[in-house]
Image (cartoon, rainbow, N blue to C red):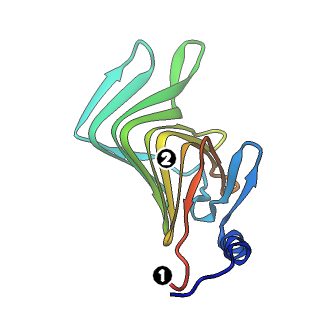
């Protein structure tokens, strides 16, 4: 078995990390999830309930949302529409996903207990047991804020990284 000096091991790990630490958590390059938020949103599910009074729709059971190459799956998704003068415009403003949330684009995937996708600003906030996988590496935290327009994310809370090295 090869024993490396502790300082050398720490240096190797820091150089191989795909994140940079800051006071708020860890900033992550999220280029695989860079997304054109103006693309149409397609939603499929086992069941749909529409509430005309508050301008929402609730999709339940095997919910799959597609926008371009990006896919979001969950047990339940509430869709909120923009309103003008009290009337729905038919344009989606937010998607609120709960239960077994999975966001995938390319080789990157993030899972969490819940997520809120605000379409106009291209922000996805994932909360509760967040796990991000990028290739063979994985990062976990309690919250991740993803900016789909820039392809970056910030992980907040206690951040844990699992990095696969070339020798493993």
Dot 2 or dot 1: first in sequence order is 2
Which of these two is toward me, 71 or 28?
A: 28
Q: In x, y percent, where is residue 122?
A: 63, 44
CA neighbours of label 1 inside 10 A, class few (<14), some (14 to 19), many (20+) = few
Front position in the image: 20 or 111 = 20
Residue at horizontal 58%, vertical 65%? 32
User: Is residue 117 placed above or below 148 in the rendered structure?
Assistant: above
Q: Which mark, by number, is residue 130? A: 2
Q: Is residue 137 above or below residue 61?
A: below
- Kind of element beneath mark 1: loop
User: Can you see residue 70?
Assistant: no
Q: Using the image, tell me which numbered label, if any, was put on residue 2.
A: none
**In the visual, does 16 lie left or right of 72?**
right
Residue situated in front as seen by the camera: 38 or 109: 109
Q: Mark 2 and mark 1 in contact? Answer it, CB < 8 Å.
A: no
Q: Position of residue 116 (x, y in %)?
A: 52, 36
Tell me the number on the disc at residue 168.
1
Where residue 36 appears, as percent x and y from the top left, is 61, 55
Instruction: Give the CA distance from mark 2 to mark 1.
Output: 25 Å
> Where in the figure is residue 167, as x and y percent of width and height?
52, 85
Choose between 70 and 30: the one closer to the eye: 30
Comparing marks 2 and 1, which lies closer to the viewer?
1
Assess disc 2: are there few (<14), some (14-19) or many (≥20) residues with their C-alpha within 10 Å of its C-alpha. Answer: many
Residue at left 44%, top 31%? 79
């Amino acid at each position: 078995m090869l024993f490396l000096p502790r300082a050398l091991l720490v240096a190797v790990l820091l150089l191989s990390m795909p994140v940079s630490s800051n006071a708020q958590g860890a900033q992550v390059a999220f280029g695989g999830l860079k997304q054109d938020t103006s693309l149409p949103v397609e939603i499929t599910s086992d069941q749909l309930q529409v509430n005309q009074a508050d301008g929402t729709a609730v999709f339940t059971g095997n919910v799959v949302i597609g926008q371009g190459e990006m896919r979001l799956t969950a047990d339940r998704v509430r869709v909120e529409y923009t309103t003008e003068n009290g009337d729905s415009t038919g344009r989606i403003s937010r998607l609120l996903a709960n239960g077994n949330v999975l966001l995938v684009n390319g080789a990157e995937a993030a899972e969490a207990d819940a997520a809120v996708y605000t379409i106009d600003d291209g922000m996805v906030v994932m909360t509760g047991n967040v796990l991000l996988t990028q290739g063979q590496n994985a990062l976990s935290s309690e919250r991740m804020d993803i900016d789909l327009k820039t392809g970056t994310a910030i992980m907040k809370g206690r951040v844990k990284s699992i990095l696969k090295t070339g020798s493993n």
